[in-house]
Amino acid sequence: MPSTQNYAAPEAIRAERITVDGTSLRFSDATTASLSPLQTNFGAINGTQGALIGVTGYTDGTLIAGTVYGSEASGVRASTPAEFSNRDAFVLTDGSGNPRYPIRGGTDGASVAQPLTAAEVRTVLEEAFTVLSRSRAQIRRPLDSRMQATISLVDTRGEILGIVRSPDGPLFGTDVSLQKARTAAFFSGSHAAPELLATPVLPGVANVPAYVQRTRTFLNDPAALTGTVAFADRSGGNLSRPYFPDGEVSRPPGPLSVEQSAQFSPFAVGLQTDLIALNVVQHLNFVVSGGASPDTPQQCTQIPDVTPGHKRLANGIQIFPGSVPIYRGNTLVGAIGVSGDGIDQDDMTSFLGAHNGGARAGTIGNAPTGIRADRIVVNLAGGANVRLRYVSCPFAPFLDTAQQNVCDGL
């Protein structure tokens, strides 16, 4: 608590404003008013009240100056007209003026007859950014603020084809939007089951191959995870919950969750954790050993490489909604992911971005309705039937119109 003096969270947004089953969450049992005055000069207490220490891979223990957000040196800046048509768009940069992820075509020509073109990628990103720019934020104050987020687009190999963000999009959305896009592309492709089955079993730590049969049994579909169904991240999230359907206590866990609901925790959520468990252990050993133990390699997941040094699920999967796969007719060609605002806003931006971009390009779009995951009905004990979800869009999401149900029928 002392570290929050002069930086305390506003009362209106503290967790204690949230109730769960009628009980308010706790934020803190102390208040800044009850604390002794805090030294504002770190040098006055350094060495007497404690000291900064080095942490291998993160800091050498010395203070460094911050970097102004939006500057070239910060790694995130306003786009140039050549990089993106919307003058409000921001891009990631290498610090020398070059975009880190310039828009490009798909890299998966060896397995996809007609990969995404750079023009198609640009069109979808532009249309998704237009949706984002019109949308009412769900998590911002004041009410009726504009949505802020990051949009990522990948091919079927998980390779980044373009990333764009709004000016105040949370920085975490860069990684999360990319995870969402890769997750939707992975689970919608024919390669999902074979690559999960080829992932090494780590006795006592993780058994990734087992999730394939669990999913097939749960869905009563022996061909599950072979490209016959288009999975949005909301669909995969349904299957990753400790109770299925989400919210009904005492139901069985989803097949991508832990095997027993009681085992679920933020550090053990099922497949999402098991894919990276060894990498986390490797990295911890690297930090604790001061670098004597090798760090985990880049890509940070245990599934096999799709090409040398590249994995479809680099850095693991995401189970929050906000992504959809992209198709050329009946053929999967990539996916789009959005992160930074409420999950329904993220869902809508990805879904409408793929739809509007596809309509403008005339060549690509959302998955055919007949193969979307919301066609799957799961039969539960006691005769209950539960349909998977695909996307969930807000009812009246735009700031410039009162249009309702903007995703219906698309």
Image (cartoon, rainbow, N blue to C red):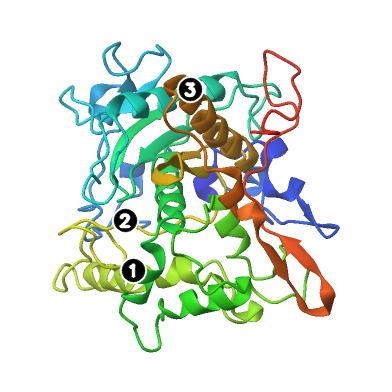
Q: Which disc number belongs to residue 13?
A: none
Image position of 208 with respect to 14: above or below:
below
Q: Going from the N terminus, do you reach mark 2 or mark 3 first?
A: 3
Q: Going from the N terminus, do you reach mark 2 or mark 1 first?
A: 1
Residue 205 in which image quadrant: bottom left
Task: Name the residue nearer the viewer: 235 or 165.
Answer: 235
The residue located at (81%, 70%) in the rendering is 384
The residue located at (45%, 58%) in the rendering is 227
- Amino acid type at mark 3: Glu
Residue 283 in which image quadrant: bottom left
Query: Residue tagged by mark 3?
Result: 127
Q: Quadrant of the C terminus?
A: top right
- Badge 2, how many Cα within 10 Å: few under 14, some, many 20+? many
The answer to whether the residue labelled 1 contacts the one labelled 3, judged by CB atoms less than 8 Å apart, is no
Q: Is residue 243 left or right of residue 5?
A: right
Q: Is residue 335 visible?
A: yes
- Amino acid type at mark 1: Glu
Spatial CA span between label 2 and label 1: 9 Å
Task: Name the residue nearer the viewer: 342 or 386.
Answer: 386
- Badge 1, how many Cα within 10 Å: few under 14, some, many 20+? many
Query: Residue tagged by mark 2?
Result: 312
Task: Name the residue nearer the viewer: 280 or 110.
Answer: 110
From the top left corner, tell me how far across and down residue 156 is, in percent: 34, 49
Spatial CA span between label 2 and label 3: 25 Å
From the top left corner, tell me how far across and down residue 90 is, in percent: 37, 23
- Amino acid type at mark 2: Arg
Q: Is residue 247 visible?
A: no
Query: Residue tagged by mark 1?
Result: 195
Q: Secondary structure at mark 3?
A: helix
The answer to whether the residue labelled 2 contacts the one labelled 1, judged by CB atoms less than 8 Å apart, is yes
